[in-house]
Image (tube, rainbow, N blue to C red):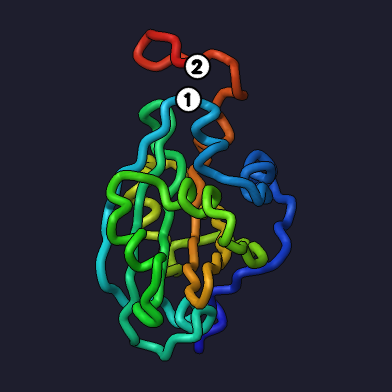
Amino acid sequence: MNIARRQVWRPSLPRTADSTPLLGWLRDRGSLTARIRSRGRFAVRVLRQGLGIPTADEARLLGLDPGVHAWVREVALSCNEQIVVFAHTVLPRRPRGPLTVWLSRLGERSLGALLFAHAGFTRGPMAFHRLDRRHALFTAAWAALQLAEQSPATLWARRSRFGLGGQSVLVSEVFSPRLAQLPEPGKESWTNGKPVL
């Protein structure tokens, strides 16, 4: 494998000029949905949901053979009508269980709200990666985040595996630089000339 194309996710997050504004968001192990919701009007838009082939390292983390289909869900999370996160979820087709049913019925609701509301879920360690155009998720994330051409050529992402019983789901979240500009909870933000609380 070409070393430049290797998808290296690291257990620690380096402090760099482009990661520093997002450090609090990237390192937070709580509900991303709840944190965004505390900053304004939250919405989920489903971009893709159905069978797909995970990347080689997603398959490895989930114990799947390369090329085996899994359930894949991709969504855009927005706050005050600004898209701030692209989320990519992979769920193995076997074993079937509650996660399979829940994922198929989520619709325009956040998976994070479900994950953190259910006491039976466990969250594994987080890993971090600075995505560039060579990464499998970059193109979909760039398009979903609606970034302008002058935006940075890399995007910060994190991922972790959640478990419930015998099922595991891998959730990767790619962060827009806009996320760092969201108002603090309880402070006013302005959209289209009107305050948004």
Q: Which residue is drawn at 62% across and 43% down?
A: 25
Q: Where is residue 11 in the image (x, y as percent from the top left)?
A: 70, 67
Q: Where is residue 88 in the image (x, y as percent from the top left)?
A: 41, 60
Residue 165, above or below 67: above
- Helix, strand or loop for disc 1: loop
Q: Circle 1: is it few (<14), some (14-19), or many (20+) Cα within 10 Å?
A: many
Residue 159, above or below 32: below
Q: Where is residue 71 in the image (x, y as percent from the top left)?
A: 33, 71
Q: Circle 2: is it few (<14), some (14-19), or many (20+) Cα within 10 Å?
A: some
Residue type at numbered disc 1: Gly
| Horizontal arrangement in the rendering, residue 185 relative to residue 79 (left or right) | right
Comparing 153 with 144, the one in front is 144
Chain-order first, disc 2 or disc 1: 1
* Badge 2 vs badge 1, beta-carbon distance below 8 Å: yes
| Residue 152 appears anywhere in the view | no
- Helix, strand or loop for disc 2: strand
Residue type at numbered disc 2: Ser
Say which quarter of the image contains residue 51: bottom left
Q: Residue at x 63, y 47 (%)?
A: 30
Q: Which residue is drawn at 45% across and 45% down?
A: 85
> Disc 1 designates what residue?
40
Q: Position of residue 76 (x, y in %)?
A: 37, 46
Comparing 60 with 118, the one in front is 118
> Disc 2 designates what residue?
189
Front position among marks 2 and 1:
1
Mark 2 → mark 1, Cα distance in angstroms? 8 Å
Q: Which residue is drawn at 53% across and 27% down?
A: 39
Comparing 37 with 55, the one in front is 37
Count of numbered tags: 2
